Amino acid sequence: MTLTTDTQTSIENDIVAAPEGTLFRFATAGSVDDGKSTLVGRLLHDSKAILADQLEAVTRTSTERGFGGESGGIDFALLTDGLRAEREQGITIDVAYRYFATPARSFILADCPGHVQYTRNMVTGATTADAVIMLIDARKGVLEQTRRHLSVVALLRVPHVIVAVNKIDLLDYDEAAYREVEASVRLVTAELGIADALVIPVSALVGDNVVDRSERTPWYAGPSLLELLETLTVIDDLDERGQATEAFRLPVQLVLRPQGAVVVAPELKDSYRDYRAYAGQVASGSIKVGDSVSVEPGGGTSTVTGIDFAGVALDEAFAPQSIALRLADDLDIARGAVIAAVGTLPPITRTLEADLFWLDPRPLAPGARVLVKFGTTVVQALVSAVTGRLDLTTLGVEPATSLAINDIGQASIRLSRDLPVEPYTHNRRSGAFLVIHPQDGATLAAGIVTAPGEPTRAGDGSGAGSEVSP
């Protein structure tokens, strides 16, 4: 792709003008018919993030379907439920991503399905979220699917959990009914180890406490949903010293060489033939020109001589920017390698313990041969043992020897190649992986590393990882 001068200038202006930490990602979750899509639609509508022609089309469709009520004749769910099957069945099937902005912050939201059959989609939407809004129907309270989604949120260590007790208008804004649901929520979140869950009474249909605080809930003194979203901290926020809170990680997706159609920084055009850079999305942390980095596999070290972003040379880059790094040394680096801040790579291992969100109809049993994808690296692996399954009723782990679809379980995995594996609690992005079927390529599970196995050598050492049979 070739960038025009106007486009490049626009990118440069955005880089200079964009305040740090202004992008916030959040997802919605909950059971079927709890009102997730309606809440998202109301949020977009009341924050003035809907184009006039889109609003007109949704209003027309709503009228044709006889939709009325206090929402002014608008079915807000139509703003996010884009698939024909979703509109016909009145349920959300796929994750719907939407972008909007307020004067305080920009947002990327993921409206996730509530049906148990689409738990895999909910896992996808929550994986990169700074916050999850868990909706609960005020009339129904905490359901099994609510517990399942909260368990996923707890295991994924989503930084912020907001529980929106929806349809409070159908209970005539009764405080006692709300407090009963709130107490149930507090009990479940405490059992799951979710600290500081925020609970808000809302009406997605009418708009109470969504963007503006409602006068119909005088007994609730907290902020509205949007006020919370505008003030919560972001995963990639910097600390008080201006440093990234996690170590730098760049999974290499592509090696850029002159023979390809690649965009380079203007100052490099004269030396284009000598250009070599390693492109990918920064998984965590930050990097500056002059920083020392190490590479795995191989254990080599070098110094960053340049950072390119869409043809613009940067002095510094942060997660989750997609960049190309230029290094001082000509190292053997290919797709799947990890470039990290020197001295921060974890010990190299070929075994790990993990929590798995099993997403495939085919059950998992010990001895299964699979592919495991860490970042841009895909290796063969063997599931050596299934050690437990989460009981959604008691929220405890029960013994298990297999996992079925939508189970959340524990397993031991042996990799075919040494990798720098780190716990999910240490690095939320580097500690996550996918389990893939080796024949048909289906995604079998999403996994998070709970504990790396015995190290085969120290991190940031020398020598490539050895190839072994899983």
Image (cartoon, helix red, strand yellow):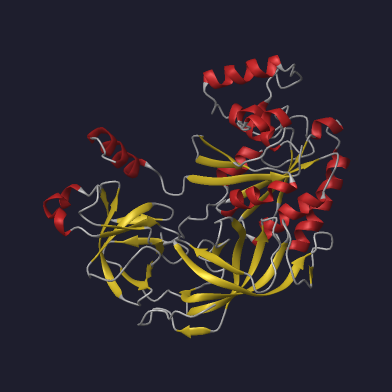
Q: Nearer the viewer, residue 247 or 393?
A: 393
* Count of numbered circles in the view: 0
Where, by quadrant of the figure, is residue 466 drawn? bottom left
Q: Position of residue 159 (x, y in %)?
A: 60, 56
Residue drawn at (48%, 45%) of the image? 23
Residue drawn at (29%, 35%) of the image? 7
Instruction: Please determine whether, in this image, residue 348 is positioned above or below residue 377.
Output: below
Is residue 305 left or right of 344 when viewed as pictured?
left
Where, by quadrant of the figure, is residue 306 drawn? bottom left
Is residue 230 left or right of 346 when viewed as pictured?
right
Q: Position of residue 407 (x, y in %)?
A: 73, 60
Q: Quadrant of the N terminus?
A: top left
Is residue 354 left or right of 247 when viewed as pictured?
right
Q: Quadrant of the C terminus?
A: bottom right
Q: Position of residue 423 (x, y in %)?
A: 56, 71
Q: Residue furthest left?
A: 270
Instruction: Please determine whether, in this image, residue 19 is positioned above or below residue 346.
Output: above
Residue drawn at (79%, 55%) of the image? 186
Residue drawn at (48%, 55%) of the image? 237
Where, by quadrant of the figure, is residue 253 drawn? bottom left
Instruction: Please determine whether, in this image, residue 13 is positioned above or below residue 273.
Output: above
Q: Position of residue 155 (x, y in %)?
A: 66, 62
Instruction: Please determine whether, in this image, residue 446 is positioned above or below residue 103.
Output: below
Q: Nearer the viewer, residue 72 or 294?
A: 294
Q: Residue furthest front?
A: 439
